[in-house]
Image (cartoon, rainbow, N blue to C red):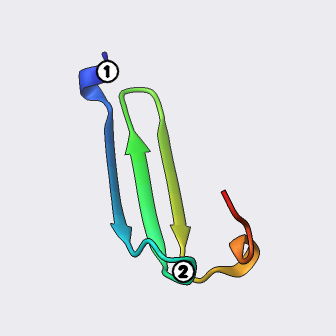
């Protein structure tokens, strides 16, 4: 079943870069599309 799961992403890696990531499989779909830092500004990992 794990062979049917896909993840893709686009965008930069710095704090101010926009990014897009998507994960999907047979029974789920998840997306994150961050066009600007907005609520993530200042968050550190």
In this view, 26 is above or below 34: above
Q: Where residue 21 is drawn, which disc sits there?
A: none
Sequence-wise first label, 1 or 2:
1
Task: Using the image as rendered, state which of residue 45 and residue 20 is in the foreground.
Answer: 45
Q: Residue at x 27, y 27 (%)?
A: 4
In this view, 7 is above or below 26: below
Task: Using the image as rendered, state which of residue 43 and residue 24 is in the foreground.
Answer: 43
Q: Secondary structure at mark 2?
A: loop
Q: Is residue 24 left or right of residue 34?
A: left
Task: Using the image as rendered, state which of residue 20 and residue 13 is in the foreground.
Answer: 13
Q: Which quadrant, please, contains the C terminus?
A: bottom right
Percent of width and height locating residue 8? 32, 53
Percent of width and height locating residue 41? 71, 77
Quadrant of residue 23 in the image? Answer: top left
Q: Residue at x 44, y 27 (%)?
A: 27
Mark 2 Cα-neighbour bin, 10 Å: few <14, some 14–19, many ≥20? few
Give the labeled residue for mark 1: 2
Percent of width and height locating residue 6? 30, 39
- Name the residue furthest top: 1
State yes or no: discs 1 and 2 in contact (Cβ < 8 Å): no
Percent of width and height locating residue 32? 53, 60
Q: Secondary structure at mark 1?
A: helix
The span from disc 1 to disc 2 (Cα, nearest Å) is 30 Å
Give the labeled residue for mark 2: 35
């Amino acid at each position: 079943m794990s062979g049917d799961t896909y993840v893709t992403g686009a965008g930069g890696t710095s704090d101010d870069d926009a990014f897009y990531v998507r994960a999907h499989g047979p029974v789920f779909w998840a997306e994150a599309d961050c066009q600007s830092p907005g609520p993530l500004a200042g968050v550190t990992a």
